[in-house]
Image (cartoon, coloured by chain):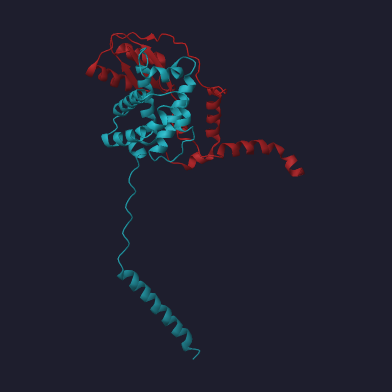
Chain colours: A cyan, B red
Amino acid sequence: MKIFLPVRKSLLAGALLLAATACSKSSDPAPAPAPAPATLYSRLGNVDGVSKVVDSFLANVIAESQTSNSSLKRTFNPLLTSGNAQRVTLLRDNLIDQIGQATGGPLVYKGLTMTAAHKGMAITTQEFGVFGVAFTKALTDNGVKDPEKTELLTIITSLQSQVVGQ
Amino acid sequence: MSALLRRGWVVGPLALLAWANWEAPALHSYAAPIELVAWQVPHLPTGPAAEALRAHLAAQPGVRACALSAATGTVSFVYRPGEATEAGLRRALAGAGPYAPRALPAAPAPAPAARQCPVPAGYVLGLERLRFALNLRRFFVAV
């Protein structure tokens, strides 16, 4: 009996191993998970693409705000006048962070909420619309495709209630 | 306690490292710094010629963005200070046609309507750059 016990145990282990192998071979392999869809952030070109769009937007704002009746002048001129170059940099930084997060980027925007940032500025709907035109031009100048452009402008437009009339 | 006092010089750098690494870095820290310049340029073209001129100027080395407005007679550049200079951009503009850039008329900054942050913006930006340089988390983020 003592001689046959290890043999029985090994036979049992071998049978279990065979059964396990047969089960794994008979079942269909699990399908590979579908790749995650590319985020808007990556489709825009990651941090370089987002920062180029923001830089184009700032260039457009500067160019357009030089007339006395420009709708952008009232809101942006305090930033653009001499001695405030670093405040423009702060605006640029906040825009990059905010657009980066809103489009699915890896890092978080840590600035003020839109309501708090625009409090007291009394932005009108027309001024917000002109901002949108300058931003759309920035997207076009950087070759952003229409689907991405629409998606990003939808995100920007959703902030209107937090910006206008504060 | 005596060991800590003997090694008190470690506390400062460790505190600095803790401050720098407390939060994940900001996305804008990965973007190269830029400078802006704008000039008044008379007789700018309109239509397709304006777009062609804009594209030509935007393609200059170091230029991140260029905008021109015939309506306001303004050309503005956003450029990387290490790769382009104002003088170089002036030459590029002059070389693109009969465009003589002039400084924009000085516009006095209006009095702020709301309370402003008392800390100069340059200090805030300097602290941010220091924080990013010491932030080890930035090596673990794919941007």
- Residue A124 in which image quadrant: top left
Give the x, y percent position of residue A121.
45, 23
Give the x, y percent position of residue B137.
51, 41
**Of A73 and A136, which appears nearest the observer?**
A73
Q: Going 42% across and 20% down the picture, which residue do you hit?
A: A75
Judge left or right: residue B47 versus residue A14.
left
Image quadrant occupied by the C terminus of chain A: top left
Would you place residue A39 above or below residue B34 in this image? below
Give the x, y percent position of residue A100.
41, 36
- Residue A69 in which image quadrant: top left
**Of A52 and A74, which appears nearest the observer?**
A74
**Of B43 and A1, which appears nearest the observer?**
B43
Q: Going 38% across and 25% down the picture, which residue do you hit?
A: A55
Judge left or right: residue B22 versus residue B95.
right
The answer, for residue B36, to whether it is visible in the render is no
The answer, for residue A85, to whether it is visible in the render is yes
**Of B115 and A44, which appears nearest the observer?**
B115
